[in-house]
């Protein structure tokens, strides 16, 4: 389905059946995008395992879209390169320079 293969900006809810956690991870990762994902489960160990396996820049567990400026944001695959926000983004916006200067010049 198109909704499962393209980067849809919502709010949108799609429901796709799966057989087990391996199947849901395979389906979720089988597209060229990976900005954000969400996992909903009463079993936090299983949810953590799925979150680690998902190829997305941000994975929400039992909540969605709670955000903080101190946390890096960005996607995997065609959903972005690099990270915005947080200290991890400074390198993207700065150019470091080193200057050595002798201050007790004999001149």
Image (spheres, helix red, strand yellow):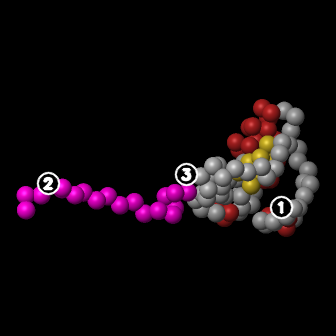
User: Which residue in the protein does label 3 denote?
Assistant: 87
Calculate the distance from the C-alpha at mark 3 to the C-alpha at mark 2: 36 Å
Q: Position of residue 26 (x, y in %)?
A: 77, 50
User: In which quadrant is the C terminus drawn?
Assistant: bottom left
Q: Which residue is mark 2?
A: 104
Q: Nearer the viewer, residue 29 or 103?
A: 103
Q: Secondary structure at mark 1?
A: helix
Q: CA distance from mark 3 to mark 1?
A: 33 Å
Q: Nearer the viewer, residue 87 or 19?
A: 87
Percent position (x, y) of residue 41? 86, 38
Contact? badges 3 and 1 (CB < 8 Å)? no
Callout 3 environment at 10 Å: few (<14), some (14 to 19), or many (20+)?
few
Residue sitting at x 35%, y 61%: 97
Task: Identify which residue is drawn at 47% across, 62% down.
Answer: 94
The CA span between labels 1 and 2 is 67 Å
Above or below 64: residue 106? below
The residue singled out by tag 1 in the image is 4
SS for callout 3: helix
Q: Position of residue 5 (x, y in %)?
A: 80, 64
Q: Is residue 45 above or below residue 58?
A: above
Q: Quadrant of the N terminus?
A: bottom right
Q: Is 101 within the magenta? A: yes
User: In front: mark 1 or mark 2?
Assistant: 2
Is residue 76 visible in the rendered image? The answer is no
Give the label on residue 50, or none. Answer: none
Question: Quadrant of residue 100 in the image?
Answer: bottom left
Which region of the structure is painted magenta? 87-107
């Amino acid at each position: 389905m198109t909704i499962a293969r393209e980067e849809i900006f919502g709010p949108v809810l799609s429901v796709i059946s799966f057989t087990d956690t391996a199947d849901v991870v395979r389906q979720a990762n089988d597209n060229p995008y990976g900005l954000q994902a969400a996992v909903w489960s009463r079993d936090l160990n299983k949810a953590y395992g799925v979150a680690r396996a998902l190829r997305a820049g941000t994975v929400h567990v039992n909540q969605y879209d709670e955000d903080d400026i101190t946390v890096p944001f960005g996607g995997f695959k065609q959903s972005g390169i690099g990270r915005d926000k947080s200290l991890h983004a400074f390198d993207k916006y700065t150019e470091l320079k080193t200057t050595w200067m002798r201050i007790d010049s004999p001149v």
